[in-house]
Amino acid sequence: MTDIKRLFDFPYYQLENHPLEVALATKYNGKWETLSTQQYIDKANTISRGLLRLGVKPNDKIAVISSSNRNEWNILDIGVLQLGAQNVPIYPTISEEDYEYVLNHSGASYCFVSDTEVLEKLKAIQHNTQIKEVYSFDEIEGCKNWKEVLDQGEDKSNQDEVEKLKKAVTEKDLATIIYTSGTTGRPKGVMLSHENIASDVIGSATRVPFEIGVYTALSFLPVCHIFERMILYLYQYYSVSIYFAESIDKISDNLKEVKPHVITAVPRLLEKVYDKIIAKGTDLGGIKQKLFYWAVELGLKYEPYGANGWWYETQLSIARKLIFSKWKEGLGGNIELIVSGSAALQPRLTRVFAAAGIPVMEGYGLTETSPVVAVNDERNHGFKIGTVGKVLDNVKVKIAEDGEILTKGPNLMMGYYNDKEKTDEAINAEGWFHTGDIGEIDKEGFLKITDRKKEMFKTSGGKYVAPQLIENTMKQSRFIEQIMVIGEGEKMPAALIQPNFEFIEDWAKRKHLEIGSSNEELIKNEDVIKRIQEEVDFYNAKFGHWEKVKRFELTKEIWGIDNDMLTPTMKLKRRNIKEKYIALYNKIYEH
């Protein structure tokens, strides 16, 4: 079965070609519980039979809200899809109001949750939905457990019906509705067919240097996001053993236990890993510290394919032995590939990690494109720093006159669920999807993203400013955790900045400065303001005079998902941030 058409074909393909002893692994009560390929499929069939006995039919919507990636998610996913029903994943961190909206808009009939926290949020709004029953993965008192559905499926007498429904599912059928965590307005339900995602997995598979059946992966990015979900199908295609991290806090421990060959990450996580490494280097003394910084400086000049010449490569091999090997150990020791997506990656991180022998391959895509449109590949000169790689072979991209990236291909969504107007806005009459991103394709065929079309603004002087470009540059400062560039219709660009409180406290200790004990005192401290001004001035030098951040204000709150300042994929909710800090905005522009 080389011809994979539907998402549930992936585990069967694995079983036929290279079955694994450890296909999936999750840690429960401090102990890893593993499932072989055969057990994974058996459990998926058991869930299918159980769901049939609950009355689930083709095209029913089953909602899943899980705070962590785990075996149960994947078993349920295959079990639902085999029946021709749809899996509707929901971000656990969105508001109760958004839970209610998504459940009602999708018409979900059953809901599976991971833990007490999610259950409590769901309970608050369940009476306003048509959810018939809620099942939990964890054992929770007063809530039905998902094992009850498994128990219902133990009797195999209706397996024939499962097989019949499986056979009836075609690649053109709807597989999932993913609600995008829009930076503005209500979430939109992206309809993805089996073909959309499967074609993207197969198209991306040629870009990853995996040997079948020998790799291990650690999965921790939310599987409700299409990026990690598509990667999980890709792992299954290549017979990669998938271990699910316990939580973001325990990633460091899990990396050392699992020793993965591959992980996926978002730029913010890689920035934090890098900052931690630098902080450790700063604590070293004498010759060790000098060596550390020599290696980092060398890493920041890295160019692929030996472009810097033999003398650089000689120094690099010394730096790898003495310094960079320890970085690799911190990630478990076996890491061969990190795939980065969801936001722009700073080129300095690509350079320094590649120099350390930890290649980070940046890709690009959207939920609407299942998601990968382009991705870097270290082989055959397919890797270029500062780009998102070359477009997949089965996908088309063209650049519109205004610089917007347009794309089409088998990975392009069926449309937005119950929203023809938004679908027609996004996909033009010729079938090209408007990504909303501005970019260019260079002469070697590499795609480069320069900004979000909607986020570019004009100052009152009529000059265009691309805020993301400035923000990504300024965020290289260890003093700056988050930054939002403002200035639409104003005389100059300015910024709202959330300082990196933890780093600034360490810096103040080293400098023997009194900066106060609260965030409020810290942001008013003259030494802190002066030091952040130095950072802003340093990075401003890279921009034209009309783009330079002329003024800034610091905020005492941490910008997070919980306080609705970031989307679940860590993008800025610009409107919310501006509204929250309107007083600071007015102070900057003296309104």
Image: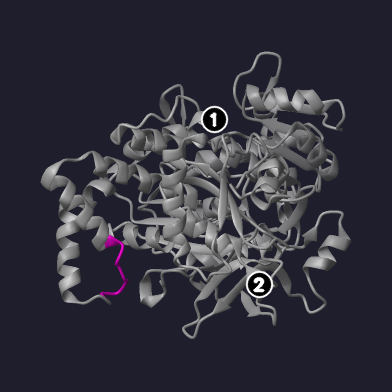
CA–CA distance between discs 1 and 2? 35 Å
Residue at the extreme left? 287
Relative vertical location of residue 115 with respect to residue 61 in this rendering, above or below: above
Give the residue at x 47% y 46%: 480
Which residue was labeled with disc 2?
A: 463
Residue at the extreme bottom? 443
> Residue 17: in sight, yes or no?
no
Amino acid on which disc 1 is placed: Glu
Q: Quadrant of residue 294?
A: bottom left
Residue range corresponding to the magenta coloring: 299-306
Give the residue at x 76% y 31%: 96
Which residue was labeled with disc 1?
A: 520
Give the residue at x 39% y 64%: 209
- The main secondary structure of the magenta stretch is loop
Give the residue at x 46% y 50%: 533
Amino acid on which disc 2 is placed: Lys
As helix, strand or loop, the secondary structure at mark 2 comes to: loop
Q: In the image, residue 271 lies at what x, y percent?
A: 43, 49
For disc 2, the neighbor class at 10 Å (few under 14, some 14 to 19, many from 20) is some
Q: In the image, residue 546 lies at what x, y percent?
A: 58, 69
As helix, strand or loop, the secondary structure at mark 1 comes to: helix
**Viewer-proximal residue, 485 or 417?**
485
Q: Is residue 193 magenta?
A: no
For disc 1, the neighbor class at 10 Å (few under 14, some 14 to 19, many from 20) is some
Q: How is the image coloured?
A: one colour
| Label 1 or label 2, whichever comes before in sequence order | 2
Q: Quadrant of residue 282?
A: top left
Q: In the image, residue 289 lies at what x, y percent?
A: 18, 46
> Residue 567: in sight, yes or no?
yes
